[in-house]
Amino acid sequence: MPAVFRLSLLTLCCHRFLVPVQAAEQTTLDTLHVVAQSTGNTSKTSAAPDQQSITIDQLSQSQIHAAEPQSLSDAVSLLPGIQATGTNSYSYTSRGFALSRDSVKIDGMNAWVLKDNQIPLIAIDHVDVLKGAGSMLYGGQPVGGTLNVVTKKPQAKSYHVVEIEGGSYASPQTSRWVGGRRMAFDSTGALNDQQTLLYRIIGDYKGQSGFAEQQNNHGFYLTPMLSWQPDDRQSFTAQFELTRYRYNDASALVAPENNIDRVASISTNYYGPQNQATDQGVSATLTYQRKLPNTWQNTTRWRSVWHRDERANFDVSSVSQSWVTRRYRHVLNHQTNHQVDSYFTGQWQSGSIEHFMTLGGSYAHTRNDFNRLSWGKNDHALNVSVYSPQFSHVDIANISHPSGSDRVFSYDTYSLYAQDVLALSEKLNLQVGGRIDWQHRELDIITHSQSAYSAAFRHYWVPNAGISYQINPSLRWHVGYSQSYQSSSLQNSDVSGQSFEPTRGIQYETGLHFTPNQPWSGDLNLFHIIKKNVIVQNSSGDDVALGRVRSQGAELSVVLQANAALNIIAAYTYLDTKVLEGDQSSQSNTGNAFINAPHHRISVQSYYQATPVLRVGAIVRAQTSSFGSSDNQLILPGFATVDLTSRYQLNAKTTLDLSVKNVFDKTYYSSAKSAIAINAGEPRYLQAKLRYLF
């Protein structure tokens, strides 16, 4: 079906909805509230945002709705300093550094229930990206950033909504025109007259066809919740998540001779039709909150997650002038995570100094079982053409498919943390804090011929400190220092099978925060980060540890309410990265820049309230070129895309969202890990969502 015809058909369908409304009773859209990006607060402190010497970039629920993103990562990339670098639940780069799976949180706890899929937008209340000292309260995470997704909770006021969404590709870059289909609901309210027993249940089903050949994904996410408030001082909330997705994913693209101009069409999929994968999980979370005397309160949260994912595909291992070499891989992974976290927040006075304290402790048990059921070697019988791959059914028995190792990692982590924000005067605040983790880890590697076991006990101390000074009523300055460690690097191993040591980091940060009386606000943050033992992939696809790396730059965000009808949100990131000491065995990457770290990146959102029932918007994203391989041989060109959005209030209960993503159908490459792992950006996409509130 031609793209023009599909666009016309969509327009006619929308016109059918809109015309009768003109004569009906018109209601107004909800007001779009925008705030300065760094004025968010973390729930783990009683100090006000302007007293803290940290950076928290917040994405509110109204901003998410206004942008009409296809996924959480699409929305998060609008913030300064962080960008999506893949499609799964933790594929983000913040201040130049890739986030680990432990760096993406759900309500402050390890997420884990989803791996290759993302939490549905309907379940999200808001998103916080905590940088520097802000991430310390959530673990010894990278100082580059921790992404915390805060989910919706039960409320007494009755609220019910149903969403139906569909989309279509309108691009000559792909022969597939059916895109995503989604149905979702959100229902909450009180179960008794006293409103002491509250419920909420959120469900989301998606059936999605990607722009690449044979790419599809379908599954569901269901999260029921129950809250009990026996009195006005305490509450219990139980929340469960149940997810299951089945999909045929698309392979990344390849660049012969590291030449991006030689990449095949973005719809090319080297996996073929026999690629199958599942992603499923169950979680249970129990939260207890209690108000204590003298403004103190306690929050205790327990969360357990059981996750399973399985993948069988013909993995891309190398590329030549004309051929892609593949190998058969079948992996089965089981992840279990149990975590309890309890912290107290409150205030106390020592002379003229007021203290805003956070005192907490946590325990986490993690077990990862990565079982390589089949770990085939390069097999020329599986070779396909770079530009026109052809597939026939492959009998696995006739190709290389030996069993690989079963790698079982387990961690027990005991933590204590504390933070004190001292109000030295009305203008000056001092922040000091620290976290100590004791971690016992075990690694068991089992192969068909032998097994190896190792165990170790380590402790890590990560301090932080900072100053916040209110220069005048509309201008605040902060400076901060923080350290971090990242133990997820232990799950990687070098070519000899030895595990790497944890990644350690130090960050210095300073920022200015403008909140004048005029209808605008802004934040400017400068940072300098040094990390040791950073794990990357070399040109051969093997993991290597870099001795010492540096990332420094600036983040600027501005919010402007030009008039009663026009809102503009802009975010700019400048990034300068460098490997100071390369591969510890060869120093081969010394002097190189990081992958997926463009020097300049900007996003601008503008929303205009054309009438009381119609809001239109435009979103521009742009970035300069970046490197797509650790040896800096692959260069990803810079690009700019434009999205158009609109929301129409059909009646008091119904809204219709229409959007066009990548209006000019720009071909671009959003990220890469190497010349055989290049991610293409989405082509032009038409999206419609009907939302009914009752």
Image (cartoon, rainbow, N blue to C red):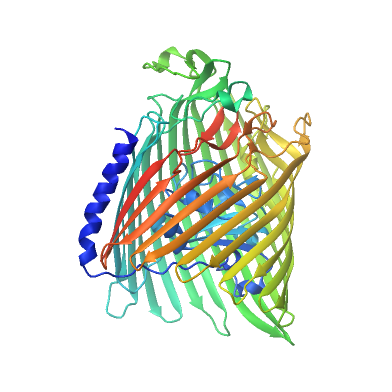
Residue 196, compared with residue 489, is above or below; it is below
Q: Quadrant of residue 434?
A: bottom right
Task: Compare residues 510 and 271 and report the one nearer the observer.
Answer: 510
For the C terminus, give its image quadrant: bottom left
Q: Nearer the viewer, residue 354 or 448?
A: 354
User: Is residue 38 shown left or right of residue 568?
Assistant: right
**Res. 137 visible in picture:** no
Please report the residue visible at 57 percent of the width from the left and 44 percent of the height from the top: 410
Left or right of 251? Residue 18 is left
Q: Depth check: give the residue in front, 291 or 480.
A: 480
Give the residue drawn at x 53%, y 46%.
Answer: 90
Residue reaching furthest to the bottom: 351
State whether residue 456 is above or below residue 17: above
Left or right: where 77 falls relative to 454: left
143 relative position to 194: left or right: right
Which residue lies at the image location 48% right of the left edge and 58% below the top edge? 303
- Which quadrant does the N terminus fall into? top left
Across and down, in percent, residue 245 comes to: 37, 41
- The picture quadrant where one finds residue 273 is top left
Q: Is residue 457 visible?
A: yes
Q: Position of residue 441 (x, y in %)?
A: 63, 45
x then y, percent, for residue 534: 70, 41
Q: Nearer the viewer, residue 499 or 56?
A: 56
**248 versus 13 height, above or below:** above
